Image (spheres, coloured by chain):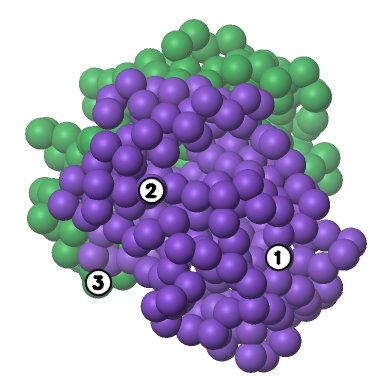
Chain colours: A purple, B green
């Protein structure tokens, strides 16, 4: 896995040929149990790396299109899975916890429910006030700037824009880690405001 | 290939297990012939993508440790190869042009000779004043901030620091694209100044 902007955050990626972007996953290394977000399959090298850092306690899935390898990794590691409360009735895999707006999975990792995206209640995650993690709605196909899903993917554009505006109002965001495309590691809050200005 | 911060720049990467970082290559798409920098092997998908954008006219190698797949790609595409003038006498592959300080390979792509790195005259490349491309000396193992090679890799630390100071004095740098690790796509000039402050 690759070190991200903090030494307790790691990432791994897989290139997607259809969109010519990387899909990304995150590991937050914590004394009380590590957390993976939207995990893709791990190579044996990355799996060993993760194990050397303490394995996995929780897997968070931001939306039902980002299940990826969560079930397999949970099976192998014994991790529990958390997913969006608004998808509870139809989520494709079994989960242990359903997260809704403002809820903290563990201290320092707070769920933010987004609306109008392609699935109900897609989660963004705010990690210790300064790192925002997004699944699908906020993404980046061009390095250094953020975008949102195209209109034909949104269930309600007005709600989606309002959700992104809410993210842009968060203070102290340094980094925006996206599930799809290029994460922004400097001036994340500014990148969110620039995004809102384009909507 | 992935779109970088400009629509005429693309990149592709390969994860390096020894260092837990990505190695990166760049393609600059130009009406007068595309240029690859420190090219790694291309997947068939990326190779088709590159061909659809006009193939390759030039390959630039920043230093003899970054030859990577240059020879094979030149053989297949007919591209010419440019490399550091200071390595001309011992360069591991045949080249068509030797670049020294201030020299432009094509309009808008200027070579900057660095000193004190692990090879003589390692090249950085300044692309249209705003994008700096580095090979080995300036790199990023932690996302969002730059670093230099460790002391035991440098032939002369004082000269290496002076070379990085010179890069940090370039005005108008938006992005710093590194051969090894995390490129900086926002505030590249500031990231260079921050780097210098740590040396």
Measuring 25% from the left and 47% from the top, which residue is drawn there? A156
User: Which residue of the protein is positioned furthest toward the bottom in this rendering?
Assistant: A75
Q: Residue at x 83, y 45 (%)?
A: B152
Can residue A83 be seen here? yes
Q: Which of the numbered marks, if any, corresponds to residue B44?
A: 3
Residues behind callouts 2 and 3 on a single chain: no
**For the residues tagged 1 and 3, is the chain the same?**
no
- Which residue, given by chain and number where applicable, does mark 1 sit on? A35
Depth order, front residue of B180/A92: A92
Q: Is residue B143 left or right of residue B76?
A: right
Residue shown at the point (16%, 52%) measured from the top left: A152
- Eyeballing the image, is A2 above or below A193? below
Chain designation of label 1: A
Q: Nearer the viewer, residue B89 or B165?
A: B165
Residue A143 in the image: state x and y as whole percent: 39, 39
Q: Is residue B114 above or below residue B150?
A: above
Where is the N terminus of chain A found, in terms of image quarters?
Answer: bottom right
Nearest to viewer (mark 1 / mark 3): 1
Residue hosting label 2: A115
Q: Chain for mark 2?
A: A
Q: Secondary structure at mark 3?
A: helix
Disc nearest the viewer among 2 and 1? 2
Query: Is B197 or A126 nearer to us in this picture?
Result: A126
Q: Is residue B92 left or right of residue A51?
A: left
Indicate which disc residue A179 carries. none
């Amino acid at each position: 896995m690759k070190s991200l902007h903090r030494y307790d955050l790691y990432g791994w990626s897989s290139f997607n040929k259809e969109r010519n972007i990387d899909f990304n996953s995150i590991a937050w290394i914590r004394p009380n149990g590590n957390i993976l977000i939207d995990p893709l399959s791990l190579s044996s090298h990355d799996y060993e790396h993760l194990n050397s850092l303490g394995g996995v306690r929780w897997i968070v899935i931001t939306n039902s299109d980002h299940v990826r390898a969560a079930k397999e990794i949970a099976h192998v590691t014994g991790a529990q899975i958390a997913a969006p409360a608004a998808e509870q009735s139809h989520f494709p895999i079994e989960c242990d916890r359903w997260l809704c707006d403002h809820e903290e999975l563990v201290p320092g990792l707070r769920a933010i429910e987004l609306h109008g995206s392609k699935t109900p209640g897609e989660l963004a995650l705010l990690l210790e006030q300064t790192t925002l993690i997004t699944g699908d709605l906020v993404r980046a196909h061009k390095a250094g700037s953020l975008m949102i899903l195209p209109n034909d993917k949104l269930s309600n554009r007005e709600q989606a824009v309002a959700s992104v505006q809410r993210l842009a109002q968060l203070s102290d965001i340094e980094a925006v880690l996206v599930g799809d495309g290029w994460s922004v590691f400097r001036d994340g809050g500014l990148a969110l405001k620039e995004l809102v200005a384009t909507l």
